[in-house]
Image: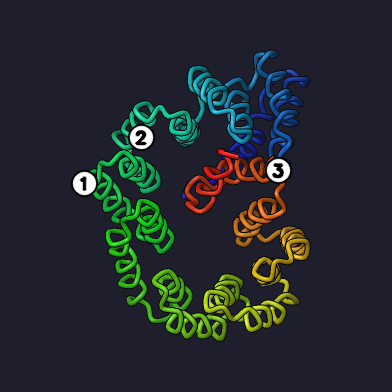
Amino acid sequence: MHKTGLIALAAACVLALGGCARTDAKNAYTKGCELLSAGETEAASQSFVQAIDAGYFVPESFRGKGIAEMTDGNFADAAISLEKSLLYVEEQSEEFQRDTKLYLAFCRERQGSTDKAMALYNELILKSPDAETLFLRGKLNLRLGNNKEARADFDQAVSLSPGYDLYINIYQIYEDAERSGDGAAYLEMALSEASRNAEDYYERGLVNYYLQNYNEAKDMLISATRKDPDDGRAVFLLGKVYLASNDIADARAIYKEYVTNEKTAAGAYNGLALCDIADGDYDSAMKDVEAGLAVGDEDAEQGLLFNEIVLYEQLRDWSTAKQKAAAFVTKYPSDEAGMREYDFLSTR
């Protein structure tokens, strides 16, 4: 699903630097990219404004400024910046424009302007339908009570890009809408997909985990770890199966076994954080999250950052939790659990 604009923005930095822009504008834009990647949103915005004022990298800088504002939860200001980015677009790629419009649609939804968000999704799908945009439009349709339209969007999305993550994300949306029966159909599709390849142990374990078939999930995930001892996803999920069965001791033992393996360390630290959370030891859990993030494993980063939000909530540091949640949904807008946390924290 949709990745954060930080990656695209960094790539744009590299491409743009080959031009003949003034050195000060070039440095300001590059600095803005670096600050945004580091989460220093206010300073990043200031650097982007310097580039805009100099008249160089204007669409890219307005977009960077919009992403920074969106990360801080300033959706009205972010929408204005993103619209300006699109206004100044000249030679930017179709991908650049598409991603900018998706961010703009996200901001419009958060502002309550669902009609404007829907118009953006319709425009993108009419031009070139893709699974991500169909998924996002389906999610909005379901939220608006347009059940038939939502189902049509989700069905078209999985026809274009069938995959376990997409099936599960759709299920979670239906579950949040208290329509688990409708969502279960997509888990069955995922099981059907998994059955085509008997070696997809992790995927079959994942689907069974969501179906709460914990014994089947455990068998599949043990097979996955035997097949590939370096599969950090399987290790992390196997521990979660034990946790779901209230077996914290076995979960902790699994994670400790794999924390010394460089390839599984980040996921194992995240698992240990879950064990500590279950035991109410939030300080230890935070240390586990920090150790996991220090490994630099992109595959495990999403889960670690989510648990970091949960921990700040448990520690009653609502301000930091809200800031972390805003950054999380900007980076992972398709993560339903992250969106729920952000919605919850928005009311604190």
Measured as percent of width and height from the top left, residue 54 is found at 70, 14
Left or right of residue 19, residue 335 in this image:
left
How is the model colour-coded?
A: rainbow
Numbered tag placed on residue 148 in the rendering: 1
Please state the total of marks drawn on the protein image: 3
Q: Is residue 98 above or below residue 49?
A: below
Q: CA distance from mark 1 to mark 2?
A: 17 Å
Measured as percent of width and height from the top left, residue 79 is found at 51, 24
Q: Give the amino acid type for the residue marked by disc 2 in the picture.
A: Tyr
Measured as percent of width and height from the top left, residue 241 is found at 53, 76
Of the two numbered discs 3 and 1 on the same chain, state the one appearing first in sequence.
Answer: 1
Circle 3 Cα neighbour tier, 10 Å, few/some/many (<14 / 14–19 / ≥20): some
Numbered tag placed on residue 121 in the rendering: 2
The answer to whether the residues at label 3 and label 1 have Cβ atoms under 8 Å apart is no
Q: Give the amino acid type for the residue marked by disc 1 in the picture.
A: Lys
> Can you identify the residue that label 3 sits on?
320
Secondary structure under tag 3 reads helix
Left or right of residue 294, residue 79 in this image:
left
Q: Residue furthest left?
A: 148
The answer to whether the residues at label 3 and label 2 have Cβ atoms under 8 Å apart is no
Q: CA distance from mark 3 to mark 1?
A: 39 Å
